[in-house]
Image (cartoon, rainbow, N blue to C red):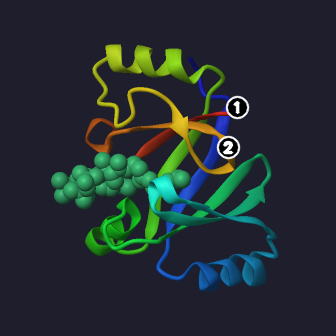
Amino acid sequence: MKPTHIEHVGIAVKDLDAAIKYYENIFGLECYKIEEVPDQKVRTAFFLVGQTKIELLESTSDDGPVAKFIEKKGEGIHHIAFAVNQLAPTLSSIEQKGIQLIDKTPRKGAENMNIAFLHPKSTFGVLTELCEKS
Ligand code: CMX
């Protein structure tokens, strides 16, 4: 199941408001939404660049995945997200090929998308998300 496009690039930041200003002031992009995803312990901000989004991620908790990432690696690119048409069968097929899944079944993410993550240890160090429009 080929991805249709890069849905978004997730960027971990310490200060969401400062990072939003950077994308607005330097690139003239418009932050069209700020959304908290309690399940992921993040506050997110979205910008559209062509068909692809930039998703800024600020942790809402010291023990969240983004806080842990920043503590270990610092701010920066956190994950890449591919859009797929049929997420559940895509996940099964990927798992059968020996790739470690973080989410064996789709769950709800930001923007009401169905999402699932693949483990970076299986994907050459890149935390990879698959997203499907619900
Ligand atoms: N990219 C690459 N490697 C990463 C990573 C990332 N984003 N996050 C963690 N890792 C690496 C760590 O560096 C560590 O590597 P080493 O063992 O070599 O030190 C390893 O993965 C384990 O990391 P950890 O800090 O011990 O954290 P956990 O094992 O508890 O969790 C992970 C790691 C990837 C399973 C977890 O962060 C996760 O489930 N992520 C998916 C959910 C998520 O990130 N949500 C936030 C975004 C939500 C959104 O887009 O809405």
Cβ of disc 2 within 8 Å of ligand 1?
no
Q: Nearer the viewer, residue 74 or 46?
A: 46
Residue 108 image offset from top left, x and y in percent: 57, 40
Q: Label 1: which residue?
A: 134
Q: Quadrant of residue 72?
A: bottom left
Q: Nearer the viewer, residue 1 or 45?
A: 45
Disc 1 + disc 2, Cβ < 8 Å? yes
The amino acid sitting under disc 2 is Asn
As drawn, the label of residue 40 is: none
Residue 20 position, x and y percent, is 67, 78
Q: Quadrant of residue 100?
A: top left
Q: Is residue 2 visible?
A: yes
Q: Is residue 40 above or below residue 23?
A: above
Ligand 1: does it lie within 8 Å of the C-beta at label 1? Answer: no
Residue 29 x/y as whole percent: 79, 70
Q: Which residue is mark 2?
A: 112
The answer to whether 57 is drawn above or below residue 89 in the figure is below
